[in-house]
Image: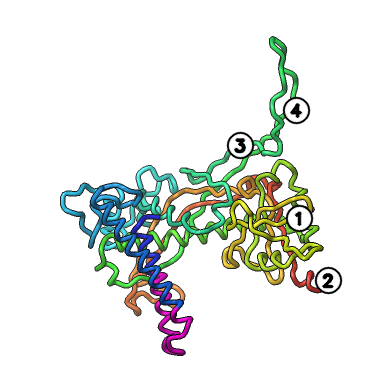
């Protein structure tokens, strides 16, 4: 995440807190809740000032980790005497394309539609794509759990050997012949890159903003949509495997042992807030909670199950939803179980006359941006994880 993006995120959070504080003040006056909200606003103000100071220092020193380290864009212009970086050139090119209506083009070397002059939109410059990917990966998502493979072609395949099939080399004496070993089992996995997309309504006034503001809007929009899209695809692969009713703590233990030693060392239990609530109620015979913080890393949770201690990772219910009363409990190593094929390609088109759902660009004086990305998600080794769940209704009935 670059510094400017960090500042925007802090400012958005501050705005939300100010709105909440205003609502409290209008309703109840200066209560403790109002004071607490304003204290959080003060903290955010300090953080924003610190970020501003870092941005100023990087502009002076031409260094740092910000994607716009030197000659930082202000109002779309470079600082005097500064040399444009690749990212700054990309920002200017993207903003110019946006103001020109995103003219259709085909990126050099693009193989997504061989023999076709255009891929259906303006290809986002590579430097901005990198910023979009950084935005996608900076927030908590299931992409952190799975294997990510970067690809350049529309389709392809990879041959691999499952981790559980590795047997190691046999010992061979000097000058002796290599003995016959079991035939290794290899599998071929294919991928087919798909195009996925959505819409973003913007006002015509956006084009009066700076180049950097226009590019930042695209980065935030495409980055967040890419993250949510990937989450859905990963869950689809997980749910394609037959679901296992774990029933209770004994079922979790059985599933954990069933993974085998090939996967247990790198496995975890993945659930959502509903699962966290259920796990948090479990106690041993002495009344001690079985779900506890990891002493070495207190922010991480662990579950004591028989002779094992399972690492626990929780996501919010929007990321990993509950189905009815069935709370997800995925057990295993998703890095070995699921692969996300990342084309790292985005394109944008716009229209000021289109209608999408309740939005009418012409009547409402809007401009609709249509964004597309290209990726695929498939299983890698389904033996590496168990698609489990706990039916809280059944548990309550049994209790």
How far is the residue under mark 2 from the one under mark 3?
Answer: 47 Å
Name the spot of residue 279 as percent of width and height, x first: 70, 64
Q: Is residue 344 left or right of residue 60?
A: right
Disc 2 to disc 3: CB gap under 8 Å: no
Give me the C-alpha separation between circle 3 and circle 4. 18 Å
Nearer to us of marks 2 and 1 is 1
Q: Nearer the viewer, residue 101 or 223?
A: 223
Q: Which residues are magenta?
A: 12-35
Q: Nearer the viewer, mark 3 or mark 4?
A: 4
Q: Position of residue 153 (x, y in %)?
A: 47, 43
Residue 393 falls in image quadrant? bottom right
The residue tagged 4 is 182
Q: Characterize the local packing of mark 3: few (<14), some (14-19) or many (20 or more) Cα atoms within 10 angstroms.
A: few
| As drawn, 3 above or below 161 | below
Residue drawn 43% across the image and 89% down it: 29
Is the magenta region chiefly helix, strand or loop? helix
- Please tell me whether mark 1 sits on a helix, a strand or a loop: strand
Picture quarter with the N terminus: bottom left
Q: Quadrant of the C terminus?
A: bottom right
**Lateral position of residue 106 relative to residue 154, left or right:** left
**Vertical relation: 63 (above or below) 245:** above
Question: Which residue corresponds to mark 1?
Answer: 305
Residue at x 76%, y 53% (from the top left corner): 255
Q: Secondary structure at mark 3?
A: strand
Looking at marks 1 and 3 on the same chain, the residue that comes earlier in the sequence is marked by 3
How far across and how far down the image is residue 43, in percent?
A: 40, 68
For the residues labelled 1 and 4, the Cα–Cα distance comes to: 36 Å
Q: Nearer the viewer, mark 1 or mark 4?
A: 1
Q: CA distance from mark 2 to mark 4?
A: 48 Å
């Amino acid at each position: 995440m670059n510094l400017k993006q960090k500042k925007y995120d802090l400012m958005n959070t501050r705005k939300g807190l100010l709105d909440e504080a205003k609502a409290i003040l209008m309703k109840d006056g200066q209560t403790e809740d109002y004071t607490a909200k304003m204290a959080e606003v003060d903290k955010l103000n300090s953080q924003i000032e610190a970020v501003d100071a870092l941005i100023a220092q990087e502009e002076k020193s031409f260094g740092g980790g910000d994607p716009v380290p030197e000659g930082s864009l202000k109002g779309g212009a470079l600082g005097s005497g500064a040399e444009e970086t690749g990212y700054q050139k990309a920002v200017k090119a993207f903003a110019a394309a946006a103001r020109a209506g995103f003219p259709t083009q085909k990126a050099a070397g693009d193989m997504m539609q061989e023999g076709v002059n255009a891929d259906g939109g303006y290809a986002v410059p590579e430097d901005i794509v990198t910023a979009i990917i950084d935005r996608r990966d900076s927030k908590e998502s299931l992409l952190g759990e799975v294997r990510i493979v970067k690809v350049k072609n529309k389709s392809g395949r990879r041959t691999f050997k499952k981790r559980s099939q590795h047997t190691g080399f046999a010992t061979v004496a000097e000058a002796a012949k290599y003995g016959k070993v079991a035939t290794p089992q290899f599998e071929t996995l294919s991928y087919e890159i798909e195009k996925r997309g959505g819409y973003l309504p913007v006002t015509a006034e956006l084009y009066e903003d700076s180049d950097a503001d226009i590019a930042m809007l695209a980065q935030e929009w495409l980055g967040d949509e890419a993250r949510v899209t990937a989450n859905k695809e990963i869950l689809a692969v997980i749910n394609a495997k037959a679901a296992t009713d774990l029933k209770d703590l004994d079922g979790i233990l059985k599933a954990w042992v069933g993974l085998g030693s090939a996967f247990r060392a790198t496995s975890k239990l993945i659930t959502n807030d509903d699962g966290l609530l259920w796990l948090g109620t479990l106690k041993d015979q002495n009344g001690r909670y079985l779900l506890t913080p990891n002493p070495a890393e207190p922010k991480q949770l662990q579950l004591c199950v028989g002779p094992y201690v399972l690492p626990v990772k929780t996501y919010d219910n929007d990321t990993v939803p509950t189905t009815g009363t069935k709370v997800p409990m995925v057990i295993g190593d998703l890095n070995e179980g699921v692969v996300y094929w990342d084309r790292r390609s985005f394109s944008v088109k716009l229209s000021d006359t289109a209608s999408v759902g309740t939005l009418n660009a012409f009547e409402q004086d809007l401009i609709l941006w249509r964004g597309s990305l290209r990726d695929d998600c498939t299983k890698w080794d389904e033996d590496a994880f168990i698609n489990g769940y706990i039916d809280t209704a059944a548990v309550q009935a049994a209790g």
